[in-house]
Amino acid sequence: MMAVVLAGCPSRNAGESTKLTAAERNAAIVAIAGRYAESQDKEAARIALDALNLPNPAQSVLALAEAQIVQNQDPESTRNLVALAQALGPISRMASEYLVDADETAGGEEVAVVAETPPPPTDTPVPTDTPTDTPEPTATSTDTPEPTATPTDTPVPAPRAVAESQGLNVRSGPGTLYPVVAEMRQGDEADILARNDDGSWWQVTLADGTEGWVIGRLVNASGDLDAGLGYRWNKVNFDYGYHIPLDLTETNGTHRFSLAWTF
């Protein structure tokens, strides 16, 4: 495995130091992440990283992934690095959001719209005037009653969300750390039930009855968005995927506040 990792590095004599330069180390980590993306063999990736003598392989992979995100480098290698860092341990919010954005927009296709060219104009013959004797109409006085306006209540359309990207994930809660429960294709519609406290996530009901949350900026919302919608905030999200659910219930006129956590 060591021979595979160092294949792209300059050869060294047996008596020279085997310590890699920063550029060689980063190139080796990117290569390992690329092979992991193809094979999903986490154990092979760990062995290859251990061969680099890194103090903390997981942190080294995450640090390189964040550097590529900030520098807006190659999206494919950056996504591979984030995926490998996630497989090795907790990742930062920056890396998590980058991975979600990459997954949400994956599969979108640009459709070229070709304008139809109208046919060339044809010469239309001008009709010749044929004199005819047209009898003059006789004036008939009729009183037409004016219709009375009847006020009607215009129904307000229910709030709806239309997916604007292909493969939009529907999650069990308003955040990228919640599991995916369904998927919306581009153009799919869903009923809007609620939104979170900052309005960045919508709770929707799909056509098959599945309920979940979608990112607000990836759907086109229409209808009366303030009618009957509640604001739901029942979880505090921490970095690295830790959640603390909060529950406030009423018991016999008193309030009980309970705190629980999962890791």
Image (tube, rainbow, N blue to C red):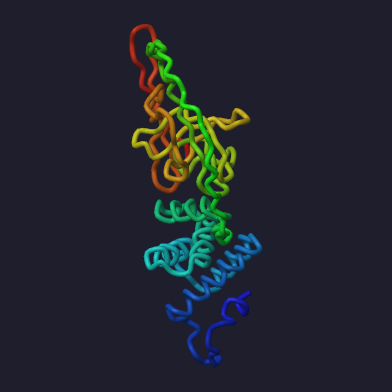
Relative to 165, say whether 32 is above or below: below
Residue visible at 43% across and 41% down in the picture = 216
Q: Is residue 245 above or below residue 242?
A: above
Residue 152 vs residue 80, the one in the foreground: 152
Outermost residue, top direction? 252
- Residue drawn where x is 56% and y is 82% of the image: 8
Q: Is residue 112 visible?
A: no
Residue shown at 52% from the left, 39% from the top: 171
So how many labels did they put on this image? 0
Q: Is residue 123 visible?
A: yes
Q: Image height check: is 120 above or below 153?
A: below
Residue 66's x, y, as percent?
Answer: 41, 62
Q: Closest to the observer: 137 or 62?
A: 137
User: Which of the 4 quarters of the picture holds residue 208?
Assistant: top right
Vertical placement of 182 versus 69: above or below?
above
Q: Nearer the viewer, residue 62 or 225?
A: 225
Horizontal and vertical percent position of residue 236: 38, 36
Residue 158 placement (x, y as % from top left): 46, 26
Residue 120 pos. (x, y %): 56, 62
Quadrant that contains the N terminus: bottom right
Asked whether 34 or 1 is in front, the reply is: 34
